[in-house]
Image: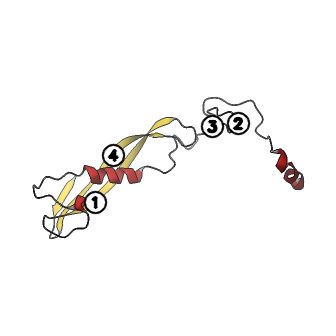
Amino acid sequence: MQLTRSTDGLLAQGSFTGDAKLECTRCLEMFNQSLNIEFSELLSFPGSETEDPVLAIPESGMLDLSPLLRENFLIMIPIQPHCSEECKGLCPICGNNLNHSTCSHDLEDIDPRLEVLKQLLE
């Protein structure tokens, strides 16, 4: 973490890493996701007009960067996290985790109302 003084305030820069325990959206298993952020924020001196109170340096001079870091880490969490790119997910019929075992039932069961459409393709 590096702090640089400027005429507008303090420029806080740094790179941080952390792990988050997430649930895979394919197989619903929990896994650890590594998160890396590059952090760069300009913190305003006391008395200056700033719209965001989180970016203002308090009168005491004690900086608490945890809200900014938490926000940056939350942005880095994927919307649909996967435990791996090769994750096979869950069986749509029985819900079995296809990463651990395979299912013996036929996946080609077609809704009888759509059987006519299959005949059109033949």
Residue 14, label in figure? none
Q: Is residue 37 visible?
A: no
Q: Are marks 4 and 2 in contact (CB under 8 Å)?
A: no
Q: Earlier in the sequence, mark 1 or mark 2?
A: 1
Q: Which residue is mark 3?
A: 90
Of the pair 32 and 79, the residue shown nearer to us: 79
Q: Which amino acid is tagged 2?
A: Ile
Of the pair 114 and 85, the residue shown nearer to us: 114
Q: Position of residue 58 (x, y in %)?
A: 14, 58
Identified at 32% across, 50% down, the residue is 70
Determine the CA span between mark 1 and mark 4. 14 Å
Q: Nearer the viewer, mark 1 or mark 2?
A: 2
Determine the CA span between mark 2 and mark 3. 9 Å
Residue 93, label in figure? 2
Q: Earlier in the sequence, mark 1 or mark 4?
A: 4
Residue lying at the far left in this picture: please name it. 60
Residue 46 in which image quadrant: bottom left
Determine the CA span between mark 3 and mark 1. 40 Å
Determine the CA span between mark 1 and mark 2. 48 Å
Q: Nearer the viewer, mark 3 or mark 1?
A: 3
Of the pair 110 and 2, the residue shown nearer to us: 110
Left or right of 18 in this view: 107: right
Q: Earlier in the sequence, mark 4 or mark 3?
A: 4
Q: Nearer the viewer, mark 2 or mark 3?
A: 2
Q: Are marks 2 and 3 in contact (CB under 8 Å)?
A: no
User: What is the crowding at mark 1: few (fewer than 14 residues within 10 Å), some, or many (at least 20)?
Assistant: some
Q: Which amino acid is tagged 1?
A: Ser
Q: Is residue 38 visible?
A: yes
User: What is the crowding at mark 2: few (fewer than 14 residues within 10 Å), some, or many (at least 20)?
Assistant: few
Q: Nearer the viewer, mark 4 or mark 3?
A: 3
